[in-house]
Amino acid sequence: MDASQAGSSNSSDFVRKLYKMLENQTDENVVRWGNEGDSFVVLENEKFTKHILPKHFKHSNFASFVRQLNKYDFHKVRHNNEENGQSPYGPGAWEFKHPDFKMNNKDALDNIRRKAPAPRKANQQTDDLMVPTQQMDLVNGQLVATQTQLQQLQQRYDELSIHHSMLLQEVIGLQKTVVNHEHVMQNVMSFLHTVDAQQRRASRVAIPFGQQGGQVQNGNVETQPAQATPLEDDIPASPLQHASKLLSETNADVMLNPRNLEHMNEITMRMNGTLTTPPPEFMRGRPASRGGGPPSATSSTSMRMGDLDNLVYPVGTNQGIDPMYSEHINNIPYPLPTKPAEPVAESRFQETRKKSTQVDPGWVRPPQILLVEDDPTCRRIGSKFLYAFHCQIDSALDGLEAVNKMNAGSKYDLVLMDIIMPNLDGVSACHLIRQFDNTPIIAMTSNIRSDDISMYFQHGMNDVLPKPFTKEGLLQMLEKHLAHLKKPVAQMDGMIAPQPLATTRQVLKEEESPAKSPATASNWNSPNQVPGISPVSNVTDEYMQQVQGHPGAYAVNPIQGGIAYNTSPQMQMQARQQAAAGHRRQISDISGGDEMNNVAKRQQMYNGPMQPAPLNPMQPRPR
Amino acid sequence: MKIPGAADRIDDATFEQILEMDDDEEERDFSKSIVYDFFTQAESTFGKMDSNLQAKDLKTLSELGHFLKGSSATLGLTKVKDECEKIQHYGQKKDATGTKDLSSDDALSSLQTAIDQAKKEFKDVEKVLKRFYHDDSSPTRHQFCTPNQEIPHHDSIHLLPH
C-alpha cells in the first residue's frame, strides 16, 4: 500500500489495492494485466478467490469483488465479436476494463471513482453527463465491432447464397426422382391390387383360410404366378418389374444425401417467402398433409418438405434394405394385426422391462452410440441407461467434439445430441455432420415447441427425444432407429409374431392418438380392408404367404419379411409421425403433472410461430 | 419408492428410474454419486450466478439457468428445475413463462428473486436427499452468498414434517 500511496493520495483504496495486486507478478498465471494493458484478467477464478482475494482484499468472495468493481464502473469484457465468442484468455477467464485503469499509468487511477449511489434508472443518465468522452469511446468501439460483425455476416451470406443456388439445382433433380418414385409406387399399388383381388378370388374358391395349413402355401406358390401372367395380358415387363427397374435406376440418386438438399430447399423457400410459417405438421398436421393419399402428390412443385420426407425415405438412409422389398410388404392390403393381440405382446414387454434393469433388446451386436451432452448429470444417467440397454457408448462434451469425432472417422449407429451446448450447439453440429455422414441423429432437448422441432428436422435431425428423457422413451428410440441391429428372431417363448413386429406395434400403440388414427387407417384404400378381427397368427400367415407366393419377384424369406416389415419406410414414417404428434403428450407425461407449467408450455407451442424462435437459423445461436 | 419428505419437490417417476439403476439397494453407489455430483454442480453454478448477477451479465445468467435446469430436470427435482427455467427466461429479458419482454432492470430484480428461490429450493431438496442417503452431515454452507446479500438461512425453517 505504501508504494501506491506515494504515487497518489486521491485514488481510492480499492483501486490502489487492485493496481498493487497486478504489480505483483508472482501470481501472473492467476490474475494479470490484459494483453493490451488496458484491462485485467482473472484467469483462474477459483485460485483467485481462494488465495489472491484474501491477500489483498481480506475476503474470499468473488461475487463481492465483482460488485466492488461494478461500483467503480469497471465492466466485464464480453467477447461476442470473436469467431466463437470465446475470450482469448480461455473460456473461464473474467476480463474487466475501466478506461482509466491502465498498466503504467498510475496517475489515471485518480479518475476512477466510486459511482454515486443513485437510483438505478437515473444512474446511466448521470454517467452520460459526467463522462461523455468515456461513453463516446465505448459506443465507438461497439460500432466498430458491430461493423466487422456485419461484414462477416455479409460475406457468409454471399457464400451461402452461392451454395444454395448450386444445391437447388440438385434439389430439382431430386424432385424428379421423387416423381419417379410416385409412379413406381402407383404401379406397385395397382399391381398389388390386381394380385390381391385375384388371390381373394382364389381363396374364395379354395377352402377357408383357417383350415388351410401348409397345403395352401404349396398351392399358392404354384398357382399364383401362373394365374398372374394371363391376367396381365402377357405384358413382357409386368408393372412390378417395370417399377423395380425404375426404382433401381433412381435409387442411386436418392442416396446422394437427400436430406441436406431438402433443408436447403426449405430454407430458400422460406427466404423467398413461399413458406412463411414453419410447417406445423411436424407437431400434428402430418397425417393431414398426406390426407389425399400418396398418389395425389405427383406434382413436384406443389410438394412441401413434409411430403418429400414422408414419401421418400422418412428416416435417413434406408439402412441397407432395398426399399423395393420392404415397401411392397407394407403395401399388401391386409389389415395390420389388430387389437386382440396387443395386450399380450405389450404386457409381456413391459413386464420384462420392469423386472430387470438390464434390458437386452436383442441386438445382433452392441450398437455404438455417441452421446453428446455438456451436462455431466444428464450424460452419466444417459450413459447408464444406454449401458443397461447393452449399447457401447462414446460421449462428447459439446457439438464441436462430436463433429470432430465423426469427422475423424468414428462410426456410430446412432447419435444422441443435446441442443444447447457451449462451443457448438447441437443443431449446428448436426448440420455439419450431415455434410458427410448420415448416421441417425436424435435431438435430446427440452425445447420442443413446434418451430424448434421443425428446425431440428430441417437441419438433419432424425427424431426428437424430449428431456428429461425416460428409460422407456430412450429404449423406444433405440428400437425405432436401430431396428436393423435387432436379432431376426421369428419367435420368442412361443410367441407367434416376430419380435420386432411386436416392438414396433407397441410404439405405435403407445403413441396412438385418436386424432390421427383415421388418417393412418385410410392410407391404403385396400379393397379388403376388413376392420379385421383376425388374430395375429392369421395375419402373419397371410402376408408371409403373399411373400412366398412370388419367390422370383420378391426373393424374401419369411424371416426377412419380418424384418423388412419392421424397417420399412412406411412403417417408420408412421412411427415417426406418431412420435412427432405424441411429443405434446410426452411433455405432460414427463414433467410430472405440473399442470400450470404444462398449460403454459402448451400455449407456447400453439403460439409458436408468433414468438421469435430462440434458435432461429438466421440468428447467431445462443450457446 | 417414495422419498420421505420429498412431497412435490421430486418427481417420483423420474427419480425412481435412476434409483432402479443402482446395483445395490443398500449402498446405492450410482444414484448417490450422481446426486452428490449434482450438489457440487449446483453449488458452483449458484456461485457463478451470484458473480454474474453482480456483473449484470444477463446472457450468461440465462445460460447458467438452462444448464442447471437440464440436470435438475433429469433428476426430477421439479422445483429447482422450475426456478432455473425462470432464471433462463429472465436472463433473456422475458417474463417467467418466456412470453413477454422485460426491461433490463426488471429482469435483474426478477433474477435476484429467482436465484434466491432456486437456492432455497435446492437447499430443501438437498436436505431431503441427504436424509434419503443416510447422510447426516450438516448441509453445505452458503458459499455463494455475498456478505451484504446473505439469503435467509433455511436451517431454521422446518418444512419437513418428520
Image (spheres, grey):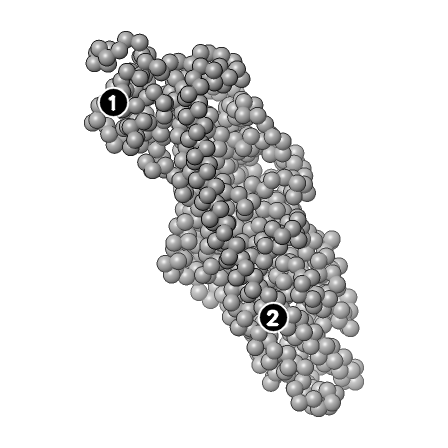
Q: Which secondary structure lies at badge 2?
A: helix
How many residues crowd mark 2 within 10 Å: few (<14), some (14–19), many (20+)? many
At horizontal 72% and vertical 72% (from top left) the residue drawn is A333
Q: Viewer-proximal residue, A90 or A550?
A: A90
Q: Which secondary structure lies at badge 1?
A: loop
Give the mark toward the camera: 1 or 2: 1
Q: Viewer-proximal residue, A540 or A518?
A: A518
At horizontal 40% and vertical 27% (from top left) the residue drawn is A76
At horizontal 66% and vertical 89% (from top left) the residue drawn is A236
The answer to whether residue A343 is above or below residue B111 is below
Q: For the residues tagged 1 and 2, is the chain the same?
A: yes
Residue B149: quarter of image = top left
Q: Mark 2 lies on which chain?
A: A
Position of residue A200 in the picture relative to residue A38 (left or right):
right
Numbered circle sitting on residue B107: none
Numbered circle sitting on residue A104: 1
Whole-percent x, y for residue A174 in the image: 58, 67
Position of residue B50 in the picture relative to residue A566 (left or right):
left
Numbered circle sitting on residue A177: 2
Whole-percent x, y for residue A122 in the image: 52, 15
Give amino acid for label 2: Thr
The answer to whether residue A435 is above or below residue A29 is below
Q: Viewer-proximal residue, A125 or A48?
A: A125
